[in-house]
């Protein structure tokens, strides 16, 4: 998050090297002949960014929880759809038919359908992470292809694609997403099936605009560089130039953008579910849980609102901190990326 | 090329202008116009940048043609046209007997092994995200010649050839100095021992001491491998050192062309004379005696070049005929056929044109402030 | 300059046209002709009503006639008829718009103030305790979904207080028009304003800070300082001015998007603005209203985009040549 200064030892070592001091061992000398690639340098910087590494740990934890959600269910003995209305213990509803708070029976309490919140949060992680990653992948991949094509081929291809991107940017995302999903619920259109597919496609599709614009701008500026001219002078064809000369120069920025896009997508999915047009109940989903909780918390079941909100917040925060760390690792002086 | 360094030494060596092999490259009436973004539907002549306007020259096998001119005179564009990085507007390019003026990219490919370019900017001409071994090995990869260990061996051989440590095969351009990067560019160009190498101001961006190294490297390679160079520069002393023949360009046209020492000894075009007078001379006494010919103003815009002789607005010897007539590039004042100038009133031996005054109206000249009077 | 203006406006109109085509395709063609009339008439419609709707909207005519009719109505400012509530879509929107406007205007003033102030302080006192605090807070609010913040605020500042009989804020859903009672109007909007503003301000803090730090490295700042100019003048007259462009751009875009309704905030606080109305309409399958809101929202975004681009060109002449 904050630019971490180099450790003092490193600075000294660097100084010694510039003064021509001979490295200690043969292995070290050989390693120094090896190119210090920009990737390696970025990774080194990232490794020393404490906040980023902690966030990475938290992300790993969340991923584990998501993968081993059934294990969580097994340990607590509560299924994700299982309702504990009694009369045998554990009782998921109080005497007045209200959700039960955190306690020995239900670690995080129950929801309005007497289900174990802890287990549902674990399963909700699956949805959030899955949609977050897949939709982001759809966005980045699609945007990359569009931006590359528009920037590289220029001409009418660029005109058409640029208009398309303009239109995409003008579309009010949430409204369109809601409308599309509701239309699709009546009448599915091709791959737009109700439920997970339409959410992923809608989230992924609307992101193309931003990525496409950025990539296009980058490609346009890279195209003018002399090393591209050199490649052409050598006889390289357009495809080779695109993949071997242009693409590697885009990768760093793409990686940064992807890491920062994932939390945005996760929040987008939660928002859609919150509004009732995302993942439908009884599938466990953080946005949907918050939506249900908002109806009844007024009667005192604060845990039903708080814990899914915390889960969402912690996940987003971790990804954002890590994303900031990745961006700082690739661009310490903050002059390359937005 | 030879290694003469004193400016007054006479170049009496054998390969001055002599027929050193066949004509490798002939350019005939090459024209390259770039359309200007005007947003209008109908393009008049005013809406083109006349980058290269009817240029003809030839280079013989094993020789070096030096191409000189100010920024904007079209020499870089000419280079790129010859390398077919641009499509030409009209004219002919005949390389090794083949007409490559308008052939398709696919048919041009085999020729790309024979014509190579070295670029000016050592920082911009190498992809910063690729290792140098990969960059130098690019030609082999593109033309599917060698692969794997064989390619690595060849690349390392090329690195040695240009004076780089072959063990730095896996390093990135950022880890090399400017001079070393230029060597990488040379190595890349040498992959197939091309017949013609176009050097587009290869030393302009380097420190002076490094310039000497690179120029000597190029000289050594030429004699070792029998290369032919088209050497573009704006520094006359560099050009003099490396060339057999020199062509001077101004606003898209060649104004004078001759074997190198002839140009220094007997410049015919006033522009050439002015350029030569600007070259620094180490001998302070000699320098003090010389009159500097100072040209007023900048090179005019190539979108709307002056009529007649394009140099007339800045020429100290301009006469009315210069405004009306376009001078042909031909031998003047009884010179040899290989020394040609495009001037109606060429500079005589011993003439000091700093003392001349133009005899055309002020409205056609560029005056002291750099603005045309009355505009 | 005029050429740029014309070109940019033409682009905007073109995209607006594309939008009408898209809306038409999704809502009129997508569901298939049989369903369109039925869905437009609403779930409660009788067969006779459906037939009437079908006739009124020319659904028995070819698609290009339908589209022409659609565009014709649009150009006359007619957004259709809401069969569900038996009123014109125009009036539905007219009722909802002031609420969205109140929310957006109040929140935007807040987020600009908060974002700019914290951004400037962070940039000027880099690495101080202020900077770290603001940056951390910005990161926190940036990561927080709007509805999470909204509900947490309601939980903490309304519910907990009210069960302890210490209510400061009114219940969510309290809306009093400005013209009726300004004090109550503001009172009911405080929590929604802060919800929307805090989340949005986070972006502005980061943006302002980044932009000012970039500019502070430029030579002209150093020159101003070396001329002996007071630090305050350097910051406000030179640094801030040069840094404002991305902030202004972002502001224009944000407001443009919100014109179509701050859907989530309105839903959380039960404020019947455009966003809330749209969501209700979707749940009730009241498509005419949905279409109306989508068109208004798109128009808002497109107009905002065009204005921002033009403003950008005014501020930075280099853009005009592009």
Image: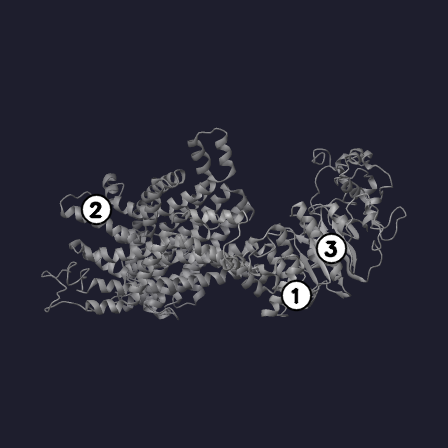
Identify residue for label 1: B105
Task: Give the chain letter at badge 2.
Answer: C
Identify residue for label 3: B219
Percent from the top left, x then y, of residue A43?
Answer: 44, 56
Disc 3 vs disc 2: which is toward the camera? 3
Position of A178 relative to B368 (above/below)? below
Task: Give the chain letter at badge 1.
Answer: B
- Residue under disc 3 on the same chain as residue under disc 2: no
Q: Nearer the viewer, residue B326 or C89?
A: B326
Q: Secondary structure at mark 1?
A: helix
Identify residue for label 2: C157
Left or right position of C1 against C157: right
The answer to whether residue C150 is seen in the rendering is yes
Left or right position of A62 against B1: left
Task: Give the chain letter at badge 3.
Answer: B
Percent from the top left, x then y, of residue C44?
Answer: 25, 65
- Identify the residue shown where x is 45% and y is 63%: A141
Q: Secondary structure at mark 2?
A: helix
- Which label sits on residue A1? none
- Mark 2 residue crowding within 10 angstroms, few (<14) / some (14–19) / many (20+): some
- Identify the residue shown where x is 44% and y is 42%: C213
- Identify the residue shown where x is 82% and y is 33%: B355
C-alpha span from label 1 to label 3: 31 Å
Q: Secondary structure at mark 3?
A: helix
């Amino acid at each position: 998050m904050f630019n971490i200064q180099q450790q003092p030892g490193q600075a000294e070592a660097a100084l010694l090297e510039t003064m021509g001091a001979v490295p200690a061992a043969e292995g070290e000398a050989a390693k120094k002949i090896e190119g210090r690639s920009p990737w390696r340098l970025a990774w080194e910087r990232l490794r020393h960014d404490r906040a980023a590494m902690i966030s990475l740990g938290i992300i790993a934890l969340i991923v584990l929880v998501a993968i081993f959600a059934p294990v969580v269910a097994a340990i607590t003995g509560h299924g994700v759809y299982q309702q504990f209305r009694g009369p045998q213990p554990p009782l998921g509803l109080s005497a007045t038919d209200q959700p039960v708070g955190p306690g020995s029976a239900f670690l995080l309490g129950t929801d309005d359908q007497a289900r174990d919140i802890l287990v549902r949060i674990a399963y909700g992680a699956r949805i959030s992470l899955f949609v977050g990653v897949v939709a982001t992948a759809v966005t980045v991949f699609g945007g990359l292809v569009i931006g590359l094509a528009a920037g590289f081929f220029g001409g009418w291809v660029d005109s058409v694609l640029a208009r398309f991107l303009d239109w995409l940017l003008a579309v009010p995302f949430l409204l369109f997403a809601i409308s599309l999903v509701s239309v699709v619920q009546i009448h599915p259109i091709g791959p737009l099936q109700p439920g997970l597919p339409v959410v992923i496609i809608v989230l992924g599709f609307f992101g193309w605009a931003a990525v496409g614009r950025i990539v296009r701008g980058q490609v346009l500026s890279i195209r003018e560089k002399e090393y591209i001219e050199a490649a052409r002078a050598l006889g390289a064809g357009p495809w080779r130039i695109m993949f071997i000369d242009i693409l590697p120069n885009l990768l760093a920025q793409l990686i940064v953008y992807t890491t920062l896009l994932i939390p945005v997508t996760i929040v987008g999915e939660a928002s859609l579910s919150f509004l009732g047009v995302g993942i439908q109940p009884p599938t466990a989903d953080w946005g949907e849980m918050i939506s249900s909780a908002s109806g009844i918390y007024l009667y005192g079941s604060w845990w039903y609102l708080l814990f899914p909100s915390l889960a969402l917040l912690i996940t987003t925060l971790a990804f954002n901190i890590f994303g900031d760390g990745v961006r700082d690792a690739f661009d310490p002086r903050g002059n390359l990326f937005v | 090329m030879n290694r003469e360094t004193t400016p007054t030494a006479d170049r009496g060596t054998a390969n001055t202008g002599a027929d050193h092999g066949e004509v490798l490259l002939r350019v005939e009436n090459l024209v390259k116009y770039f359309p200007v973004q005007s947003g209008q539907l109908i393009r008049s002549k005013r809406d083109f940048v006349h980058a290269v306007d009817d240029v003809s020259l030839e280079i013989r096998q094993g020789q070096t043609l030096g191409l000189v001119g100010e920024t904007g005179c079209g020499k870089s564009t000419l280079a790129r046209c010859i390398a077919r990085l641009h499509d030409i507007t009209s004219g002919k390019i005949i390389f090794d007997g083949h007409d490559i003026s308008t052939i398709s990219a696919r048919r041009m490919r085999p020729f790309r092994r024979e014509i190579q370019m070295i670029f000016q900017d050592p920082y911009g001409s190498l992809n910063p995200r690729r290792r140098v071994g990969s960059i130098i090995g690019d030609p082999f990869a593109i033309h599917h010649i060698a692969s794997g260990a064989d390619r690595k061996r060849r690349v390392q051989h090329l690195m040695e050839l240009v004076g780089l440590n072959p063990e730095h095969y896996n390093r990135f351009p950022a880890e090399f100095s400017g001079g070393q990067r230029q060597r990488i560019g040379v190595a890349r160009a040498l992959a197939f021992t091309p017949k013609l190498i176009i050097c587009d101001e290869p030393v302009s961006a380097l420190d002076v001491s490094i310039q000497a190294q690179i120029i000597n490297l190029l000289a050594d390679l030429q004699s070792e491998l029998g290369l032919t160079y088209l050497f573009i520069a704006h520094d006359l002393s560099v050009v003099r050192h490396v060339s057999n023949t020199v062509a001077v360009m101004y606003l898209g046209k060649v104004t004078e062309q001759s074997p190198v020492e002839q140009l220094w000894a007997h410049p015919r075009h006033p522009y050439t004379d002015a350029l030569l007078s600007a070259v620094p001379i180490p001998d302070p006494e000699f320098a003090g005696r010389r009159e500097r010919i100072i040209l007023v103003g900048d090179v005019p815009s190539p979108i709307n070049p002056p009529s007649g002789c394009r140099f007339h607005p800045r020429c100290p010897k301009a006469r009315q005929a210069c405004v009306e007539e376009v001078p042909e590039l031909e031998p003047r004042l009884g010179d040899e056929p290989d020394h040609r100038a495009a001037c109606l009133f060429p500079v005589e031996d011993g003439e000091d044109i700093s003392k001349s005054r133009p005899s055309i109206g002020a409205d056609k000249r560029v005056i002291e402030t750099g603005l045309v009077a009355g505009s | 300059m005029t050429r740029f203006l014309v070109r940019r406006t033409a682009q905007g109109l073109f995209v607006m046209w594309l939008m009408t085509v898209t809306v038409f395709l999704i809502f009129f063609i997508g569901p298939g002709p049989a369903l369109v009339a039925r869905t437009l008439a609403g779930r409660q419609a009788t067969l006779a009503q459906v037939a009437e709707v079908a006739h009124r909207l020319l659904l028995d005519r070819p698609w290009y006639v339908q589209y022409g009719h659609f565009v014709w109505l649009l150009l006359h400012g007619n957004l259709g008829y809401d069969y569900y509530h038996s009123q014109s879509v125009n009036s539905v929107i007219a009722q909802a718009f002031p609420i969205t406007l109140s929310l957006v205007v109040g929140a935007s003033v807040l987020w600009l103030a908060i974002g700019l102030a914290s951004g400037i302080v962070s940039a000027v006192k880099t690495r101080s305790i202020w900077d770290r605090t603001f940056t951390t807070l910005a990161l926190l609010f940036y990561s927080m979904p709007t509805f999470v913040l909204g509900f947490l605020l309601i939980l903490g500042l309304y519910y907990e207080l009210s069960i302890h009989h210490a209510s400061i804020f009114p219940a969510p859903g309290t809306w009093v028009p400005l013209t009726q009672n300004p004090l109550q109007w503001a009172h009911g909007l405080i929590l929604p304003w802060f919800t929307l503003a805090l989340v949005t301000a986070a972006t502005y803090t980061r943006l302002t800070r980044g932009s000012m730090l970039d500019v502070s490295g430029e030579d002209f700042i150093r020159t101003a300082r070396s001329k002996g100019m007071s630090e305050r003048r350097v910051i406000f007259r030179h640094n801030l001015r040069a840094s404002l462009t991305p902030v202004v751009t972002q502001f224009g875009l944000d407001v443009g998007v919100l014109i179509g309704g701050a859907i989530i905030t309105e839903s959380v606080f039960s404020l019947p603005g455009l966003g809330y109305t749209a969501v209700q309409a979707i749940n009730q399958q009241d498509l005419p209203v949905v279409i109306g809101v989508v068109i208004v929202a798109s128009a808002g975004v497109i107009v905002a985009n065009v204005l921002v681009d033009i403003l950008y060109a005014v501020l930075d002449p280099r853009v005009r040549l592009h």
